[in-house]
Image (spheres, grey):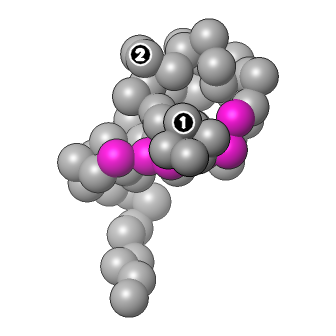
Protein backbone atom coordinates (compact mmCIF):
# COMPACT_ATOMS: atom_id res chain seq x y z
CA UNK A 1 0.00 0.00 0.00
CA UNK A 2 1.46 3.33 -1.11
CA UNK A 3 0.33 6.90 -0.87
CA UNK A 4 1.52 9.25 -3.59
CA UNK A 5 2.32 12.71 -2.25
CA UNK A 6 2.88 15.66 -4.56
CA UNK A 7 6.31 17.21 -4.13
CA UNK A 8 4.66 20.61 -3.67
CA UNK A 9 3.35 19.36 -0.32
CA UNK A 10 6.82 18.63 1.09
CA UNK A 11 9.19 20.84 -0.90
CA UNK A 12 9.42 23.62 1.70
CA UNK A 13 10.48 21.14 4.35
CA UNK A 14 12.90 19.43 1.95
CA UNK A 15 14.58 22.75 1.21
CA UNK A 16 14.85 23.66 4.91
CA UNK A 17 16.40 20.30 5.82
CA UNK A 18 18.78 20.24 2.85
CA UNK A 19 20.02 23.77 3.56
CA UNK A 20 20.47 23.17 7.29
CA UNK A 21 22.13 19.73 7.18
CA UNK A 22 24.90 18.39 4.89
CA UNK A 23 22.91 15.35 3.75
CA UNK A 24 21.84 14.09 0.34
CA UNK A 25 18.75 15.44 -1.37
CA UNK A 26 17.22 11.95 -1.33
CA UNK A 27 17.71 11.65 2.44
CA UNK A 28 16.33 15.16 2.97
CA UNK A 29 13.27 14.25 0.88
CA UNK A 30 12.65 11.08 2.87
CA UNK A 31 13.00 12.85 6.20
CA UNK A 32 10.78 15.76 5.09
CA UNK A 33 8.06 13.41 3.84
CA UNK A 34 8.03 11.52 7.14
CA UNK A 35 7.91 14.79 9.06
CA UNK A 36 5.04 16.21 7.02
CA UNK A 37 3.06 12.96 7.37
CA UNK A 38 3.87 12.62 11.07
CA UNK A 39 5.52 9.23 10.58
CA UNK A 40 8.73 7.80 12.04
CA UNK A 41 11.70 7.49 9.68
CA UNK A 42 13.98 4.47 9.61
CA UNK A 43 17.43 4.49 7.96
CA UNK A 44 20.37 2.19 7.76
CA UNK A 45 23.22 3.77 9.68
CA UNK A 46 24.86 6.50 7.60
CA UNK A 47 27.76 8.64 8.81
CA UNK A 48 26.34 11.77 7.19
CA UNK A 49 23.08 11.49 9.17
CA UNK A 50 24.48 10.25 12.48
CA UNK A 51 25.50 13.67 13.90
CA UNK A 52 21.94 14.98 13.35
CA UNK A 53 20.03 11.85 14.34
CA UNK A 54 18.20 13.36 17.30
CA UNK A 55 17.43 16.67 15.57
CA UNK A 56 15.97 14.87 12.55
CA UNK A 57 14.16 12.26 14.66
CA UNK A 58 15.78 9.38 12.75
CA UNK A 59 15.97 5.79 13.97
CA UNK A 60 18.63 3.48 12.60
CA UNK A 61 17.75 -0.11 11.72
CA UNK A 62 20.57 -1.57 13.82
CA UNK A 63 19.07 0.08 16.92
CA UNK A 64 15.98 -2.13 16.57
CA UNK A 65 17.90 -5.38 16.41
- Residue 63, labelled with which disc? 1
> Would residue 26 be counted in the magenta stretch?
no
Q: Position of residue 16 (x, y in %)?
A: 45, 24
Residue 63 shown left or right of residue 6 in the figure: right
- Determine whether the residue tagged by mark 1 lies in a helix, strand or loop: helix
Question: Is residue 17 depicted above or below 10 in this figure?
Answer: above
Q: Position of residue 10 (x, y in %)?
A: 38, 49
Q: Position of residue 64 (x, y in %)?
A: 50, 44
- Tell me the quarter of the picture where residue 8 sits: bottom left
Residue 62 shown left or right of residue 17 in the figure: right
Instruction: Give the quarter of the figure containing the N terminus.
Output: bottom left
Question: Is residue 24 depicted above or below 11 in this figure?
Answer: above
Look at 64% across and 19% down and name the residue there. 50
**Magenta segment boundaries in residue numbering:** 40-45
Observer able to see residue 16: no
Observer able to see residue 4: yes
Residue underneath mark 2: 55
Tell which residue pokes out farthest to the bottom in this image.
1
Look at 62% across and 11% down and name the residue there. 51
Compute the Cα span from label 2 to label 1. Answer: 17 Å
Between 62 and 58, the residue placed more toward the observer is: 62
Tell which residue pokes out farthest to the right in this image.
47
- Disc 2 versus disc 1: nearer the observer: 1
Residue 60 shown left or right of residue 9 in the figure: right
Between 15 and 44, the residue placed more toward the observer is: 44
Nearest to N terminus: mark 2 or mark 1: 2
Q: Residues within 10 Å of mark 2 (few under 14, many from 20)?
A: few
Look at 48% across and 36% down and name the residue there. 59
Q: Position of residue 44 (x, y in %)?
A: 67, 44
Amino acid sequence: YFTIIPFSRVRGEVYKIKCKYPISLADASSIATAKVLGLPILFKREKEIEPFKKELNVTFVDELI
